[in-house]
Amino acid sequence: MSAYVIFVRDRITDPAEFSQYEQSAGAAAAGHPLTPLAFYGALDTLEGPLVDGAVVLEFPTVAAARAWYESPLYQQALPHRLKGAEYRVFIVEGLAAQ
């Protein structure tokens, strides 16, 4: 069953740190079965606080999504995102194929 990692960016707090994250996070995709479905495209906040940016990554399973998130390359990039921006990040399981 597919799974999605959703990144909701509330705001950038340190542009230099966030730039470091952007430069290093892409390499973490190597060897992982992920498909970007949305990547900081135009958005319209319908409810709640304004959203500054969003990313949706598709994986074949929750385990594959977690393996990518916990991978050494992503974990190297992660501190730069945590220092450089405020995000909410979660994994959501997709619907079973019918």
Image: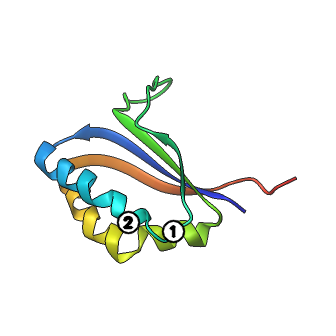
Residue 67 located left or right of residue 94: left
The mark found on residue 28 in the picture is: 2
Residue 3 located left or right of residue 14: right
Residue 70 appears in which quarter of the rendering? Answer: bottom left
Q: Nearer the viewer, residue 49 or 77?
A: 77
Helix or strand or loop: what does disc 2 sit on? helix
Residue at far right of view? 98
Q: Can residue 14 be seen in this view?
A: no
Q: Position of residue 20 (x, y in %)?
A: 18, 55
Q: Residue at x 46, y 69 (%)?
A: 68
Q: Can residue 58 be seen in this view?
A: yes
Crowd tier of the residue under label 2, counting other residues whose Cα lies within 10 Å: few below 14, some 14–19, many 20 or above: some
Q: Which residue lies under the disc numbered 1?
A: 32
Q: Position of residue 40 (x, y in %)?
A: 40, 36
The mark found on residue 3 in the picture is: none
Task: Kindly indicate whether the residue at mark 1 contacts the one at mark 2 (C-beta within 8 angstroms).
Answer: yes
Three-letter code, disc 2 = Ala
Relative to 10, is 76 above or below?
below
Crowd tier of the residue under label 1, counting other residues whose Cα lies within 10 Å: few below 14, some 14–19, many 20 or above: some
Q: Position of residue 31 (x, y in %)?
A: 48, 71
Q: Which quadrant would the N terminus be assigned to in this image?
A: bottom right
Residue 47 located left or right of residue 81: right
Three-letter code, disc 1 = His
Residue 14 appears in which quarter of the rendering? Answer: top left
Q: Residue at x 59, y 73 (%)?
A: 63
Q: How is the image coloured?
A: rainbow
The Cα–Cα distance between marks 2 and 1, rounded to whole angstroms, is: 8 Å
Relative to 4, is 45 above or below?
above
Helix or strand or loop: what does disc 1 sit on? loop
Q: Where is residue 54 in the image (x, y as percent from the top left)?
A: 42, 39
